[in-house]
Image (tube, rainbow, N blue to C red):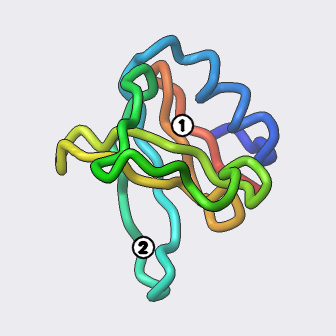
Amino acid sequence: MNIINTDRAKELISQSNGRIFSTTFIKKDNTLRTLTARLGKKYKSKTDRNAPYKAQNYNLMHLYDMRKKDFRMLNFNTLQTLTINKTKYTIK
């Protein structure tokens, strides 16, 4: 298993070109969650309002959850593992 930092994880996800990948992270309620997601879909607000903050300022990224069929935010501060291109990475 390869060990990478959060900046490298952001690069790998950004360079995924819409491919599906998997992550595990700790949610706000301190439970572990596995997310199967992808980039490439564009988020459209249901109320047509802009977000009151920029996600990248808070170390977050918009992703499309393939199981729930909805958009989610990935917090890189709590990221544990990333599996992309059949390679598993541990985040330190």
Is there a contact, CB below 8 Å, between mark 1 and mark 2?
no
Looking at the rendered image, the quarter that the N terminus falls into is top right
Of residues 85 and 71, the one nearer the viewer is: 71
| Amino acid type at mark 2 | Leu
Residue at the far front in the pictured view: 48
In this rendering, position of residue 71 left or right of residue 62: left
What residue appears at the point 65 percent right and 26 percent down from the top-left corner?
12
Residue 28 drawn at (x, y percent)? 50, 81
The answer to whether residue 87 is above or below residue 57 is above
Q: Which residue is identified by label 2?
A: 32
Residue 38: numbered disc = none
Element assignment for label 2 = strand
In this rendering, position of residue 65 left or right of residue 10: left
| Amino acid type at mark 1 | Lys
What residue appears at the point 59 percent right and 29 percent down from the top-left corner?
13
Of residues 87 and 50, the one nearer the viewer is: 50
Element assignment for label 1 = strand
The answer to whether residue 11 is above or below residue 10 is above
Mark 2 nearby-residue class (10 Å; few <14, some 14–19, many ≥20):
some
In this rendering, position of residue 51 left or right of residue 9: left
The answer to whether residue 85 is above or below residue 22 is above
- State the image quarter where residue 92 is shown: bottom right
Of residues 43 and 39, the one nearer the viewer is: 43
- State the image quarter where residue 18 is shown: top left
Residue 56 drawn at (x, y percent)? 73, 47
Give me the C-alpha separation between circle 1 and circle 2.
17 Å
Q: Which residue is identified by label 1?
A: 88
Mark 1 nearby-residue class (10 Å; few <14, some 14–19, many ≥20):
some
